């Protein structure tokens, strides 16, 4: 699953594949507008619904936090 999430994120910014920081938003790897695209792609790929309450800076800070979110919603 993590590889698929990385693939989805890499479509938005290729630098994500090499990113090992603590916060993709603060490091300007992704933007708040990118999160909308990411949410849509994750919902389609994993057949989940991501409610607005889960769309936070913390949930989208790292690849691992995004993976945890998807796992929790499956």
Image: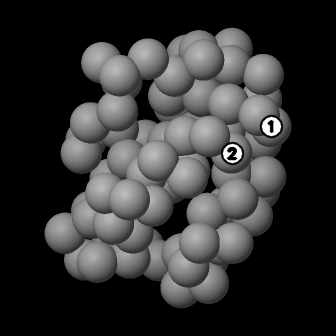
Q: Residue at x 38, y 76 (%)?
A: 29
Between residues 60 and 51, which one lies in front from this camera angle?
A: 51
The quadrant of the picture occupied by the C terminus is top right
Residue drawn at 25 percent across, 77 percent down? 27
> In terms of image quadrants, where is residue 53?
top left
Which residue is depicted at the point 62% across and 84% down? Answer: 14
Figure check: 53 above or below 28: above
Q: Which residue is mark 1?
A: 45
Q: How many marks?
A: 2
Q: Which mark is residue 13?
A: none
5 left or right, relative to 55: right
- Depth order, front residue of 50/20: 50
Left or right, residue 66 beside residue 48: left
The colour scheme is one colour
For label 1, count other residues whose C-alpha is less than 10 Å away and answer few (under 14), some (14-19) or many (20+): few
Q: Is label 2 in a helix, a strand or a loop?
A: helix
Please indicate, yes or no, whether residue 62 appears anywhere in the rendered image. no
Work out whether residue 29 can be spotted.
Answer: yes
- Residue 5: x %, y % from top left: 69, 51
Separation of residues labelled 2 and 1 (CA atoms): 6 Å
Q: Which residue is mark 2?
A: 41
Horizontal side of residue 4 vs 31, given as left or right: right
Question: Where is residue 31 shown, x and y percent of the image?
Answer: 33, 66
Q: Quadrant of the N terminus?
A: top right
Residue at the image position 68 percent from the left and 30 percent from the top = 43
Instruction: Tell me whether the residue at label 2 lies in contact with that at label 1, contact meaning CB atoms closer than 8 angstroms.
Output: yes
Q: Quadrant of residue 8?
A: bottom right
Residue 8, compared with residue 15, is above or below; it is above
- Determine crowd level at label 2: few under 14, some 14-19, many 20+ residues with C-alpha closer than 10 A: some
Q: Secondary structure at mark 1?
A: helix
């Amino acid at each position: 699953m993590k590889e698929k999430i990385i693939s989805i994120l890499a479509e938005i910014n290729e630098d994500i594949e090499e990113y090992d920081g603590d916060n993709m938003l603060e490091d300007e790897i992704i933007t708040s507008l990118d999160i909308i695209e990411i949410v849509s792609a994750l919902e389609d790929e994993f057949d989940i619904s991501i409610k607005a309450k889960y769309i936070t800076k913390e949930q989208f800070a790292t690849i691992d936090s995004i993976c945890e979110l998807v796992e929790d919603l499956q």
